Each structure stands twice: as C-alpha cells, then as structure tokens.
Image (cartoon, grey):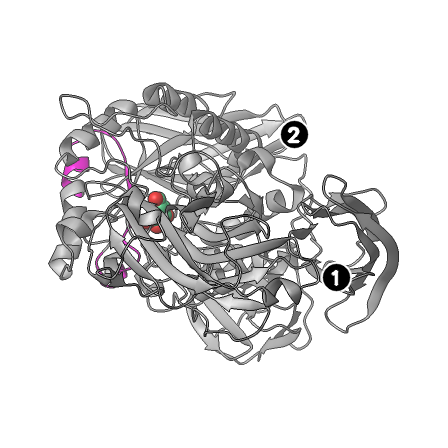
Amino acid sequence: MIRKIFTMLFLSAGVLSASAQEVSLSKGWKFAVGDSAQWASPTFNDQGWQAANLNESWEQQGHPNYDGFGWYRTKVVIPSSLKNNSFLKDSLRLNLGSVDDNDEVYINGKLIGKYGGYGGTIKDGHYGARSYTIAVNNPAILWDKENVIAVRIFDTGGDGGIYSTGHGNVFNLTMADVMDHVTVNTGADFEYGENNSLNKSIKLVTTNKYLYSGKLAFKVVDPENGTVLYEKTNDANFTSGKPFTYSFSIARLAKRSYAITYTFTDTKSGKSIVKTETTPYVLTPYPSAKVKINGADVFGARPGNPFLYLIPASGKRPLTYKADGLPEGLKLDANTGVITGVVAQKGDYPVTFTVSNSLGAKTKKFTISIGDNIGLTPALGWNSWNAWGLSVNDEKVRVSARAMIDKLSQHGWAYINIDDGWEAENRAADGKIVTNSKFPDMKGLADYVHSLGLRIGIYSSPGPRTCGGFLGSWQHEDQDAQTYGDWGIDYLKYDWCAYSEIVPKPDLPGLKKPYQVMRGSLDKVHRDIMYSLCQYGWGDVWNWGGEIGGNSWRTTGDIEDTWQSMSGIGFRQGDAAPHARPGHFNDPDMLVVGKVGWGPSLHNTRLTYDEQYTHISLWSLLSSPLLIGCDMGHLDEFTLSLLTNDEVIAIDQDALGKGASQYVKKDDYQIWVKDLKDGSKAIGLFNTSDKYQTISLDKNDPAISGYTKFRDAWQQKYIITAGNALTAKVAPHGVLLVRVEK
Ligand code: GAL
C-alpha cells in the first residue's frame, strides 16, 4: 500500500493487559515472507522465523521492496474467564491492528475470517484496520489452552504486513460487547425544509440478534454558551434487521453550527452509545438569476497548442457569450461559452467577455496570455482519488464531468482528473501503456470531457509501478507522454511511489531527476499538459518544484478527512507558501469535503461544517490547486455552497498568485494574510481551538492599517466594524475570511 510517510500515526500497540476483559496480542508475533499452507498449522515449527515488530511494515524489518505473500504467527492462551465476565457471551473479537493489504486468519489451523469481510480474493487490496468476530462455540478456539493464530498476508505493493497505524492500532482478543456492532448512523444528509427548518433522520442499527430496548436522548446545544436548544428522549428498540429511525426537525435561524448529541442507553445492560455531530449552515448567498462572469482574470496557453477555455458565468440559462479582442486563431461558441483554436503568436491579449441572458448583460476584462507559462492560477477541478480510490471507472468520471458542467463550471471549475487505477497490468507488445477494463476507451472519454468544454487529467509514477500497484512510466516516459498527447490529456499527476525501488535513498539531484525526465518527455508533446509533482514534499520541493517545470507540487503526505489531518497539513504550509507564484503552486493535497471514501463505499466527510469552511478558506489563501475529492454525483446543498462561492474562489484564483503568510500564530488561533493583485488583502482569522474565540487585529496593525472596508468573503457582504479594528467571534475550528479594501 501507499507509503503514508507523514500521516502514519504510530500509536502504541498496547501493553500486555492482565484485565479479564481483554487478552493482549501485541507481543510474541513472528513472521516470514513467502507462502505455504503448512504455516497455518498449529504444529508447524516457526522457531526459525523472525520476531515481528508491530509498529513497522516488513519493508522496515529487513525486506525492502518486498511485495507478495507473508505470514505472521503468535501463540496465546484464551481464558474462559473472558466470556464468563462478559455481559454478552456470544462472540469473541480478534482485533488485528491494521493489515496491508489483505489477509486470511487461522486459529489452530482453521480459517476463521478473511479479507476484512470485503469478499473477493486475497489479491484484492483492502488495506486497513482488521477486526474479526468469532462465535464462542467455534471449535477452532481452544478455551484455557494455547491457541496458534496464523495470518496469511498478501501485499499488492508498497508497504506490507501487519502493523499499527491510525487505521487500527488494537491488537487483542475481547468479548463482543453489548454496544459492539451498534451504530448510530448519521450518514443521511440534512434536508433544508421550509420556514428555515433543518430536518434529518438517523438510525440505530445493529447486526446483533440481541433486542436492544431503552431510551434515545437527543440534545442540541449552542456551542458558544452551552445553551440547550432542544432536548428530547424517546423509547427506542432495535435488533438485527430492524433498525430504529429517529426523525427530527429543528430551526436554523442563526448562521452557525449547533452540536447534536445522540445517546442511546440500553435498559437491561445499562450500556450506552454516544454519537455527536454538528449542523450545517450555508453562508454563500443564494445564486442570483442575473448574469455574473466568474473565475480567474487570466488564462495561459502555449503558442501552437490546442486551446480550450470555458467562460465561467452564472445566472439564469440560456446565456449568450461574446468575446472582443480574441487573438487570431481562436473562436468562441456563443451558446456554450467555449473558446477553442490555436494561437501562433506569443503575447498577452486583452479580451472583453460579454455574457447576457433575459435579465441583462455583464462584461469582464480578461487576459489570454500566450507564452511558455501555463497554469497561471491554481487548477480548479476534481480528482477521483479521495472519493473512489482504485475503484474509479469510466462511468464515475463521466458522472463527475456532467456534474461539473451542470453545477460547478459556472464558477471556474475545469479539470476532471483520473488518479491511480486506470492502467492495465501489462503494456502492449510495443511497450505502449494501455488502460484496464474499467476504462474501455480513454480517447473517447477525453473527447467527451472536452466536448463539454472541460479538461481531463491522468496519473502515473516515475517508478515501475504506481502506489496502487499499477503500471508506472519507468523507462517509458517518452512513449507515455506521447500516448497522453494522443488521447488528449491536459493534466498529469506524477507520483513517486515505486521509484523508491530504483533510487531508495535519493539525494537532491536524485529527487529531481525523474521529474525532469518526464518534463522533457511532456515538452515533446504538442499539448498544454499541466504537470503536478507528487512526492509528498520531500527535499523541500517548494524550493525547486517550479524550476524543474512543475505547475504544482505536493507539499505533504496524503490528507484524510479529519481535523487533525487537514489542519495539521494546512497550518504547516508557512515555509512553502512564499514559493507560490503564477504557473507554480504549492499543493497541500486534495479537498476532503463532501462524500469521500478512497474506495467503493463513501461516507460524509468527518470534518465539521466549520472545519470545512476552514479547509476551503485556508487552501484559497494558500493559492492551492482546489481539487474536489468527493462523489460529484451526490453533491449535497452544503458542499455545493462551499464550492460555488465566487468571492472565495476569487481569493484562490487571484492573478498575483501569492501564498498567504502565517501572520499570527497563537495556541488558540491563527491569522493568515494574502496580498491580492488589486492591492487589497485576504485575511483568514482561524480559531484552532475547541471553544469560541474572539480574534482581533487592531486598526493600527500593519496588516490592516489604512484599510477601511472589510468584506466577509463567504457571506459576500461588508462587515460593520467599530473603530476600524477587525474583530470577530469565531466558532471552534472555524474561520472568518475577509477581504480588506482601501
Ligand atoms: C499516493 C498519493 C495519492 C494517490 C495515491 C494513488 O501516493 O499521494 O494522492 O495518488 O498515491 O495510489
């Protein structure tokens, strides 16, 4: 699996526990690479095997670059006191930390669980936490005797083995508790009802046969002052196959999040399960029917290459488009707003766009810059990874493109990028890269995306294989770049991955080299292909990513949809930020708003609504590429409001291309300031604490002195301030994003 260099959380694997509720499995493991059916057997002699460290992959324990099969074994006495002391006495749970990438688990030679319950085969990667439930009367278990646990692992690529990460760090045997396998399912979207109501249904769900009978307490609190706004307790009964549904409707009068707590208490056992969530609130004004021309003020393209630009304009359809001053070689489709053609001559061409509908017309001055530099403002688009992981396919890409055209391109969103998972297992006989069966016709797909006026991206690695174990471009760089050109690709994300097998410990020139090789190959292709370097920030890439021809470079390991991950990455961008400039931007990784999942099943982002405002505000201040990472087929009202706020997007797309500086850094809050092209500034007042904070800048503070007008970018309205100081009460993990003007 992926080398999550920066995000791996090595939490302690647990200490040998003497408690009657659990038997620790954190010690005593041995392992071997290879494969043999004998290794499941309790009588197999594993004395010669290597002791396993459960904090490390097998690569880190003397098997660099090893992919394929390996086995882990340990011996443990399972005391019957475990079940005797438990309220429920049905099943035992085997918690196996995290498995990379897939597993089969044997107790005393008998298979008791496999593939994390996902189905398929051991060769399908299902990297992640593992927990198996075994009936107490399963004859595989020898109560009060020594048991041999053997785990067969298959690693599809990258790191492999059993080890603890943030995804699963518990190695033990416990009895299934009353509240195990009980979920308070809050996955449904909030509905925005009439009269400012916010409605939702949640479910109490279990796979246990036990009849849960008790009370569900529902409580809504204003986090600023602890005021309880709603409180209600209902009877709730549920069991396997018969969930309990609770529907509620609350008023959404204030523009802020409330905290909801759901507590179910089972009467007989006295056990409880608690789940919390916050309520959404939309700040982006309701879209106007009048025409507005949105997006950046400039677009760069190379002379002689195919040109494609969709004029982003919102307002009641149909719209009619006009462009005055287009350079020779370009033509505009007046009905779609798509400009195509080829410009031969370098130069900055001032253009005036006019867009009209039944309610009137708007104009906007725009620059078409024909030269060597492309990507003059950060890319705005979608990438498949955070939503679909390796399960991306042609259909999902088309759905995303369609959704972008219907809902987002009016605001400047333009790229549809396919991440890992499109490549075949082997190259064609002539060495050409080919797609796997999920992408039957890449050229056809690219043509479709282009026909909508959007651009399409693809993914590869300089190594022999990608992080997902697919084919990389190693020693086929020219050929692959040519193939991308033939297909009509507009964006390449180039991810280090298995290049570590070629150069395990690169020095600075070594870090640059594979990216320079592909740069050379892309330069031979007559297309404007945005070049996105992905090597997790190694060697402080922000110092040199632009020089070697990257339009953007990842500054970090992989993001996850948690506050810890998103804020940890975002607020650490201070060193990289000054290196952002037109055509060359820091990339703190893709967005984690909306429905994400990194695989076939998705969930709502675990970020609170305020955290999502922080995410988009901070990334915009940083001039980061904004690459949506969610299911575009199911954009809920809140997510859509986050992604269609033109004044916020304008901060990201500002033509000066600066990254914000970390102006104030305190324990509880931070202030980031970004200079904008028109002389105004964008300022983010971020509350990084768990409580409401008042955050202020004095009127004489150099960041705002001389600036008299403060505009709330999310609400798109001027803030009335006392004495020209900038002061705001900011929600926990939330932000006030302002544009200060003279
Ligand atoms: C990781 C990369 C992710 C994604 C993934 C695909 O290395 O950081 O963004 O591209 O590989 O396997």
In percent of width and height, residue 323 lies at: 45, 29
Position of 153 with respect to 60 (left or right) is right
Mark 2 residue crowding within 10 angstroms, few (<14) / some (14–19) / many (20+): some
Residue 542 among those drawn in magenta? yes
Rendered image quadrant of residue 509: bottom left
Q: Which residue is mark 1?
A: 261
Residue ID at (81%, 70%): 227
In the rendered image, which residue does mark 2 sit on?
A: 316
| Magenta region | 519-544
Magenta-drawn stretch contains 111: no
Q: Residues within 10 Å of mark 1 (few under 14, many from 20)?
A: some
The answer to whether residue 711 of the structure is visible from this angle is: yes
Q: Secondary structure at mark 1?
A: strand
The answer to whether 51 is drawn above or below residue 297 in the figure is below
* Picture layout, residue 240 above or below residue 279: above
- The residue at 22%/47% (across/down) is 498
